[in-house]
């Protein structure tokens, strides 16, 4: 197991190198530049030249690339040319916001996906099975941004049950410690933060969680049906083992390994995919920060956000793979 972890971790710097290179080149290939976007703010040609020099834009693209990689090796993500803030501190502020949204979305996906999958798998070929499969296909096919807008129209504009934008009401005074609202609520004793946060995170979490639950539903359904056909399940039923015990102790336990893998992979995807939900709902996470940086050609912020998202995606996939190996003794023996 230790050797497998080491081998997988070796590829992390390689992956991040390619991601950093791709983001660096893609940003420079976009039409317009940070200087042009700020052109209206320049009062003199000398000020413009000074800013170009400070940003290193007077150097060739390969010189800029070399400087960028050198800073990255030193774990220096640079500074925002718009705000002057250190990119690492900006990531530290926004990453917890995205993680908590991804976790909330994961909870929605797990409950909806496994619930529909178990119900459909327990009654295959019935009307309920057909309806649930149709719902899962529809959810999987819906674009996140479109589904988010529909939720805003229905639950914000028509029913008025939830707020449309932001993470907390502007009237709430919140001094972050970890920037995870639930954790800070416990640390600070500010339990008045919980309900407002839940109201704000519900629609973004439903947008991401429900549209990704279709994959988990279909995997759970197929796993339940296929496992129910195996010899040891038939033997257990012939011995008179109660149906609920067979289902929960044997069938669900066998299906759990595949479910674990999908949940882990989807959680990694949610960290990057939450970008859409953050933009639609004005949720102040690292995805929205990165999108705003791309639009403003704030190179350092865009590069830092993309690299951090990629790093977390790779690490979560690694953790998922290792947890799968830990949960399945056959894989542990095979890896020795």
Image (spheres, rainbow, N blue to C red):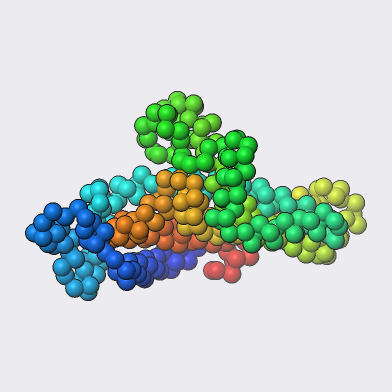
Residue 261: % across, % down: 60, 60
Q: Which quadrant of the structure image shows residue 321?
A: bottom right
Q: Which residue is painted at 66% across and 57% down in the image?
A: 139
Q: Nearer the viewer, residue 107 or 196?
A: 196
The answer to whether residue 30 shows anywhere in this view is: yes
Residue 137: % across, % down: 69, 61
Q: Is residue 257 left or right of residue 48?
A: right
Q: Is residue 207 above or below residue 269?
A: above
Residue 57: % across, % down: 19, 66
Residue 76: % across, % down: 25, 56
Q: How many marks?
A: 0
The answer to whether residue 260 shows anywhere in this view is: no
Q: Which residue is painted at 42% across and 48% down in the image?
A: 285
Image quarter hosting the C terminus: bottom right
Q: Is residue 247 left or right of residue 16?
A: right
Q: Nearer the viewer, residue 334 or 285?
A: 285
**Looking at the image, which residue sits at the far left?**
46
Q: Is residue 134 left or right of residue 91?
A: right
Q: Is residue 150 left or right of residue 136?
A: left
Q: Which residue is painted at 80% across and 59% down in the image?
A: 130
Q: Is residue 168 above or below residue 232?
A: above
Q: Nearer the viewer, residue 86 or 60?
A: 60
Q: Which residue is painted at 54% across and 55% down in the image?
A: 145
Q: Which quadrant of the structure image shows residue 133?
A: bottom right
């Amino acid at each position: 197991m230790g050797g497998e972890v080491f081998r997988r971790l070796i590829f992390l710097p390689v992956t991040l190198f390619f991601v950093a290179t791709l983001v660096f080149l893609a940003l420079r290939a976009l039409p317009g530049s940070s200087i042009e976007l700020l052109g209206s703010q320049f009062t003199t040609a000398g000020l413009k030249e000074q800013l170009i020099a400070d940003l290193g834009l007077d150097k060739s693209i390969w010189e800029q690339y070399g400087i960028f990689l050198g800073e990255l090796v030193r774990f220096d993500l640079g500074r925002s040319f718009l705000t002057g803030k250190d990119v690492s501190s900006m990531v530290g502020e926004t990453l917890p916001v995205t993680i908590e949204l991804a976790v909330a979305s994961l909870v929605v996906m797990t409950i909806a996906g496994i619930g529909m999958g178990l119900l459909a798998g327990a009654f295959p070929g019935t009307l309920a099975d057909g309806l649930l499969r149709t719902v899962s296909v529809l959810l999987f096919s819906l674009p996140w941004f479109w589904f988010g807008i529909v939720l805003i129209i229905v639950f914000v504009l028509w029913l008025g049950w939830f707020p449309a934008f932001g993470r907390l009401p502007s009237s709430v005074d919140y001094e972050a410690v970890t920037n995870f609202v639930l954790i800070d609520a416990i640390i600070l004793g500010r339990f008045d933060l919980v309900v407002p946060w839940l109201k704000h995170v519900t629609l973004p979490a439903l947008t991401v969680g429900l549209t990704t639950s279709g994959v988990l539903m279909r995997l759970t359904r197929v796993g339940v049906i296929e496992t129910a056909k195996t010899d040891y399940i038939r033997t257990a039923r012939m011995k008179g083992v109660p149906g609920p015990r067979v289902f929960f102790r044997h069938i669900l336990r066998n299906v759990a390994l595949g479910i674990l893998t999908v949940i882990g992979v989807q959680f990694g995807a949610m960290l990057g995919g939450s970008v859409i939900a953050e933009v639609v709902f004005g949720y102040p996470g690292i995805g929205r920060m990165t999108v705003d940086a791309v639009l403003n050609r704030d190179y350092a912020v865009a590069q830092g956000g993309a690299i951090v998202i990629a790093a977390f995606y790779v690490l979560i996939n690694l953790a998922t793979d290792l947890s799968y190996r830990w949960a399945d003794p056959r894989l542990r023996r095979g890896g020795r």
